[in-house]
Structure formats: C-alpha cells, structure tokens
Amino acid sequence: MSVNRLTASKVLIGVLPALLIIAASAVAMYKIKYLGYNLEAVTQSESYHLEMVMDFNGHSSPIDISMALPKSLPNQTVSDEAFGSEDLKFSFQKTGLNRRGKWGAGSIEGKRQLNYTATIITKNIKYEIDSTIMPSQEIPNNAAFYLLPDSMIQSEDPAINLLVDSLHLSSDSSVLYNSKIIYEFATFGLNYVRYSGTIDAVTAYHLNEASCGGKSRIMAALARNLGIPARLVGGKILSSGQSKATHIWVEFYVKGYWVPFCPTNKYFAEIPSNYLILYYGEVPFITHTKDINFKYYFNLKKRLTSTVAGLNKLKKNPLDILNIWATFKKVAISLELLKIIIMLPIGILAVVFFRNIIGLETFGTFMPALIAIGFRDTGLWNGVLLFSLIMCFGSVVRILLDKLHLLHTPRLAILLSTVVLFNLGLTAVGVSLGYLNFARVALFPMIILTLTVERLSIITEESGIWNALRIAFLTMIVASSSYAIMSSRFLQSIVITFPETILVVIAIYIYIGRYSGFRLIEFTRFKHLLVRS
Amino acid sequence: MALLDIFKKLPSKKGIVGINKRNLDLIYTHNKRSFFPNVDNKILCKNVLKEHNIPVPKTLFVVDSPKVLKKWNLELASYDHFVIKPNRGFGGNGIKLIKRKDDSFYSSGEEMTQDDINFHLQQICNGAFSIDNTSDTAYFEETITNHPELSLFTLDGQDGITDIRIIYQDNIPLMAMLRAPTKESDGKANLHQGGIGIGIDLDSSLTTNGCHKNNFITQHPDNKTNLKGHEIPFFQEMLEYGAKISDIVRLGYIGVDFVCDASQGAMVLEVNARPGLNIQLANQDGLGTKIK
C-alpha cells in the first residue's frame, strides 16, 4: 500500500517537471507563432534619465539663465521633460535649429537650484556616403549658410588654403574621398589636447593640436573650403554618473543628409548610441548672469524601457491578458516594480543552488535574495559597501544594547530604529556630497538589515567573530549572484515577454527538491570518509 | 545534470548520507511534521518518557510566567548545582550549568549574580534561544555527575558532561557515539562547537574511533587518552530505552541523547527529530549502509 503510494509519487515527480516545461513551451510557441510575440518586440532599450542641475546665489539682482535643450531627432528621442524653476520664470526659446530653456527673474536674493529632467533614448546611426557624390552636389538654401566662413571656422584663411593643398584635397574629388582625408587629418594628424577654452580652426592648425572643438572646427573649415556645407554639433556623451563636460563633433551636408563625424572618439560617418545632440552651430551650451556663483552638472542614470514600436505592436494583441506589461500598466504598477516581482522566482535560483547544491551557509534562507533587491537601487558595489557599513554600525549598537540588559523584542526595536536613523544619515551625506546612488540606501529593506545584524551578533556570541564574518561573506556572495540574475537585461526581457518561464524554473526547483546527492562542501566535510575504504 | 549525478552516486556508493539525503529519505519520510513538538518541547517529552518508565533527569523548576521568575532561588535553595535550559532550544544554545558556592553563583568559571540569572531566564522566555524565535519556557534541571568510567574523557576540574547519542530508524539502532567536551568547546559536548565524537560498536558496547571537527582522531586532543576500547556503562539499558521511544513520540527517525549518571545510571537527556550527520565521522562509517 505504502509502496504503491511511494512509486505513484515518484512517477508524479518524474512527470511534473516535464509537464511544466511542455506547458511553458506550448504557451511560448503559441504566443510567438500566432500572437506575433518576439523578444525583439519587447526587448528593452537602454534609456537615460537625464538631469541637469544648476545652482546659483542671487544678490537681489536680475537673473537670466539660458541652456540648450535636447530635442527628438532621428538618433534620439526626448520625453518626459520636466523643469524645476523655484521662483524664477521658465520659458522656451526657439532659435533656428536650436531649442533653449530660459529661466529669468527681476530680483533674486539667496541660493536657488534649477533643474531640467528628461528621458533620453538614443541610437547608433551609420551613414554610407555614395562615392559618386561630388562637392558640386545641389545645395539647398538652408544648408548654404554652412558654407560661409566665420570667426571660428575661417574656411577662407590662407592657412586653410595651404592645408587643403598639402592634403591634396580637391573639389574635383568625391565628397567621400575628401571626407576621409579630412577626418584622418583631424583624427590622427592633430594631437589631442584637452583645452578648457575655445580654439578656432586656424589656431588649431598653427598649434598642431586641439581638443574636440578645435578638431571639429578644422574639419568644418576644410569642408567649407571645398564647398561642402559643415556645421558643429554640441552634445553630451551619455554615461551613468555626474559630470560637467560637454562634447563637440561635426556634420557634413551630403545630398540631403547631415552626416556626423567625431574625430575625437573616432567615428566616421557615424553617431554612436551614447551621443546626445544638444545644439547646432557655434552657440554656448549655457549662459548666465555673471557673479552669481553659478554651478551646474549633469546627472545621468541608465534605465531600461521597452521600445515604443514593440509595445504598440503588442497592444493590438487580441490576447492582451497574456501581455503582463499591458496588464500591469492598467493598474499603474511601474515597470521597475514589475521587474522586481517577476524576477524574484528566477533570482532565488541562486539561493536554492548555493544552499542545496553547494551548501553555503547564509543568514536566513531567503535573506540574500531580499538583500539583492536592496542592491537594485544602489548598484552592486555601492550596495555591498553600504551593507557592510550598516552591519558594522549595527553590531556596535548591538554590543552597547547588550550592556543595558533589555528584553529581546524592545531591543530589536531599538536596533531597527538606530539602523533607520543611520540609513537616513547616510542618505543625507550622500545627497550633500552628490553621490546620489549612495543616497538611495534609504530604500534598503530595514527590517531585513536589522534581523541580519541580530543574526550576526548571535553567531558572533555563539561561535566567534570569524565564523560570523565568514557567513556574512557567503551571504554577500549569494546576494550578489541573486542580484546578477535579477538585473540581467537578457533574462528580464525573456521573463517579461514570456512569464511562463517561471514554470520552467519551478520544474528546476522540483528537480533540485528531489536531489539527494552531496552538497559540494560535504565533499570536504566527509573527505576522510570518502577516501577510506 | 551529469555532475549532479556524480554528486549523488559517489557518496551513495560509499554509503555516506549528506544533508539532502538525510532530509529527503530519513526525516521527511519518517517524521511527520505534526509530531515534531513531541520532542521539541523538552519538558513535555521528559514527562511522557517518565510515564513510560524511561528515566530522565529531574525537572526542578519551570519558569513559564513572569510571576514565578524570581522564585527560583527559593525553590532551588537545597541545590548547589543545577542547569538552566530553554524548553524549545536547539543545538545546545542557551544552556547554562550553574554552581552555587557561598551564596554566589558561577557558570563556566564566571560569577553570575542573581540578576544575571534572572536576565538569562527572561532572554529564554522571550524566545532568544527557541528553535523558531517565539516565546519559550525556561526550566531548571538537576545536574548529572558523569559516571566514573566516562570521566576519563573530561578534563579535571572542568564542568561539562559527556553524552551518548544513538540514532534509531523505526526502533532499530543504526549508530551510536559518545560526545565529550574539550577545552575548545568550553565544556559543551556539541561537535560543531569543538567537542569530540567517539564511535561506539553497537554489539560490544566498546568505543571505536573518534573525530574532532572533520578529522579522524585516536586520542583525546586535551588529555591524550586513547579513545578506543572503552566500555560504555549501562549501554544495553540505553539501547532498550531508546528502542521504545520512536513509538512513544511517534517519530520514525530520531537521535536519542543519553547521559550516564554516577548514581542513577542511564537516563534520556533529550530526543532529537533532526539528528546531525557527524555520527558518521565518529564511527568512520556511513549511515547509508545501515539504513533499511
């Protein structure tokens, strides 16, 4: 009787994972074949949260600040723009191709902070220049303006004429040929030097060195000299973190297209996916009233968003309910939160693997996965650093509390309260130093931290500080692995598009759940027994 | 997957049981969750065993409410030695051996005031040492005096007691070991705290080999006594008592901890529903060969 039941449950356990995997594949296949799902449709593209922060101190005087604002172009989309203006008046200003934001007030006394935020999605575009196009191509009026010499791009200066000759450039050669020579000269012929000021084309030629602006201007001067319209582009190289620097590159007009070249970072007829265009031409990125102790910086955060095209395609889907994305949007649950929820079953793969197959000891069973969720806001390295800081602080508090001889629960409550205060303190320090990722420590799961401190202290008491540190270290390893899984963009795309992946993970858990073999560390624990006999 | 197969086949060929196998094939299949409290609640377990005429150390006083907390000193006035234990503790945590000398109390050589003891009792009641961190009961128990034949495994002048663990599957003893404290384990016989384990041959009642941490040993690390060939007093009684316990507590796979008191002989100290696997190292043999 009991034998029958045992074999029956064994059969069920053998079949169940297979059934789950078949079911998951069937649903996924159906979605791909009949509903038009594909990974590309919902694969998330990188986006940046751009923040521009401006600080100044007014002295009861009029204030006038103007900044170039990015706009949507073939290589970039700008959305969710927002402006912080305190008691200043904000307005848009359109000048030619450029768009600027203007903050102004009649009289301002004291410190103010202004900001501009937007979501930026950029993409890489490569251009092919037809080798039959000659500089004598037809040039429309709006491009002809970019043939004229100016004070920074002195395209008719004798020095530029001389350079054209010595490089064997000629308006009888193709645009492609001339562009290549010009690009190679600016990229490799001129030394790169980082200048803080602005250098014009002729000065750059005489110095034989230039920064991004000088290299771009000398390219523009040579092109204009040959009759190819050329204009400067000012922009920002996107990368996470805080920075002040802007970048300059150049565009040539080629038969209806403005083709980008960056001699500084070596892009020929290509705009890379991390370039954001802010303005065209010889205009300042930012202007402001003098003597107001004006400071500014960019703060960029990388994010993931689904591509608009992909989403629109799935919206037409008759089986909308299968599309978690749309479903969650209806109840205003953010994609970020959805990601945490949906990645958790996959993230704990690390926990299960390290516990049942490797045999690592950690604080609490699922504690590492919960700690990993905390890392999501701070990033891995900041997260590990902050976590260790909090553990040290908490342990000191715990030792002091021990001397007071308090009851268990109130003592834990005090520990929790001090951990909260410490985190808020870290956040305040982070904000004032400008380390915003650091500041997001306030989002760490406090109760988890408190219980971890408690476990750490108890283990220290029972089996010594080294054992406690060892377990803390192993907890970090499992938490980091869990974080790596949960923050993998590839896995996120798969799971968000095909939530049935979770059934496959359940099948894996059933398999591991019936695994009666050694945990890896048991090979050392029982090494003498294994060698014997 | 193929690697996991090796992880499975190699130990099973050698008959060694790992934690996964213990949980899956021994604990989950033999021990019903609902009967765990029968052994996790130690006061209750002792009472039930006593009813079945299995000797257990006497419970001297139970602290189950704040009202009675401070009465222990009065109740234990006639005892110079006693042990404080959490009712639902695990792994030896929260256990304190207390000695009275001229109206002062000592534990592990350190003086403890009455307030210190009160605080420790409060800690236990608040669940600081209980298996699931929920509130608990503390109790006082009589101390055991090691049977003279077992005292050769303990150090002179050190508190600490040796105990004998026998593992049963469906009333049949599988393996036995003696656990002795060392300097390192601070008087505690728990193996993970540095105590030593010494295998016992079930047929002859004689000690065999030993282990310290994960290593095989032949001598006690502190007093260099040879571990092999010592007869365990009252071992047959222990085997008999143990064989009845599975049916009493309704758990099929158990580890029973015995002590051997100088005057009272074999007694059951506690019953464990999740016995550890170090007994294999102490016996230098795998449990797998013994399991039915």
Image (spheres, rainbow, N blue to C red):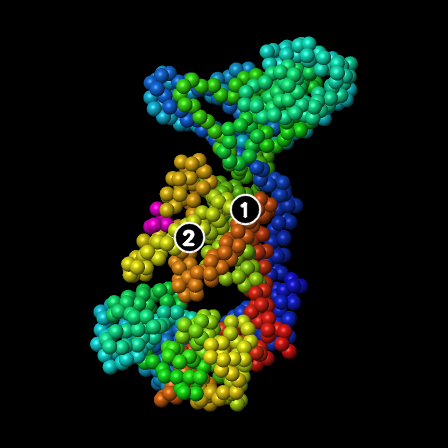
**Which quarter of the image is occupied by the N terminus of chain A?**
bottom right
Question: Does the stretch in magenta take in B223?
Answer: no
Q: Quadrant of residue A210?
A: top right
Q: How many marks?
A: 2
Secondary structure that dominates the magenta span:
helix
Q: Which stretch is magenta?
A: A417-421
**Do tags 2 and 1 sit on the same chain?**
yes
Name the residue beneath numbered marker 1. Answer: A487
Q: Amino acid at mark 2?
A: Met
Q: Say which element carries label 2.
A: helix
Secondary structure type for disc 1: loop
Given this view, does label 2 or label 1 mark the residue nearer the observer? 2
B16 relative position to A56: left or right: right
The chain to which mark 2 is attached is: A
Residue A284 location in percent, x, y? 52, 19
Disc 1 packing (10 Å; few <14; some 14–19; many ≥20): many
| Amino acid at the residue labelled 1 | Ser
Q: Quadrant of the C terminus of chain A?
A: bottom right
- Kindly tell me whether residue B177 is visible in this rendering: no
- State the residue position of label 2: A391
Q: Residue at x 40, y 86 (%)?
A: B147
Which tag, 2 or 1, sits closer to the chain's start? Answer: 2
Q: Is residue A274 left or right of residue A286?
A: right
Question: Residue B46, image x and y in percent?
Answer: 36, 80
Residue A528 x, y percent position in the rendering: 59, 73
Q: CA distance from mark 2 to mark 1?
A: 24 Å
Residue in view at x 35 percent, y 46 percent: A421
| Relative image position of residue A241 (x, y in whole percent) | 51, 36
Q: Decide if residue A151 is in sight here.
A: yes
Q: Is residue B150 above or below residue A32?
A: below
Q: Residue at x 55, y 44 (%)?
A: A323
Name which residue lies at 59% across and 11% down: A151
